[in-house]
Amino acid sequence: MHLTIFAVPRGIAMPKSARAASCALLMAAVAALAATGSHAAGASLSGSERTLLETQLKDHYKCELADVLFVSDIEVGGKKTLEGRARCKDQREVDFKKPQGHEKFELKLCEPTVC
């Protein structure tokens, strides 16, 4: 995807409605790039993995799976790990990890951190 941003030369006033439209267009482009980039790793959950994740989310967090936001295969020291983030229907997000050879996912509820 290629994004070109046009600038208005100095000294030329841009109407508020045009600025708002430009801002909305820019935000839509950024959202589209973020959405396509989130699946760039090329990994995905198999049907059985998705079913297992749904079951574990219900059991641990009473979460109905709405979407899998991203999935990636990470390899460290010759061992692969499937990692990603899921969103519940109530908008909570849960990080998941499943090391190669393990039967279940490790789940961690994403909570805001205040420093």
Image (tube, rainbow, N blue to C red):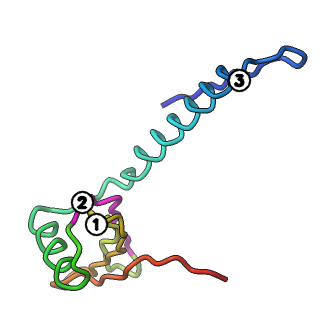
| Amino acid residing under circle 2 | Ala
Q: Would you name the residue on which mark 2 appears?
A: 66
Check if mark 1's residue and mark 3's residue have beta carbons within 8 Å: no
Residue bounds of the magenta highlight: 65-75
Mark 3, Cα crowd under 10 Å, few <14 / some 14-19 / many 20+, is few
Assign a secondary structure to mark 1: strand
Give x and y (percent) for residue 109. Answer: 37, 80
95 falls in the magenta region: no
Q: Earlier in the sequence, mark 1 or mark 3?
A: 3
Q: Which residue is found at the position 16% from the left and 71% from the top?
A: 54
What residue sits right under mark 1 in the picture? Answer: 88
Q: How many marks?
A: 3
Q: Mainly helix, strand or loop, the magenta region?
A: strand
Mark 2: few/some/many CA within 10 Å (<14, 14-19, 20+): some
| SS label for mark 2 | strand
Along the line of sight, which residue is nearer the eye, 12 or 40?
12
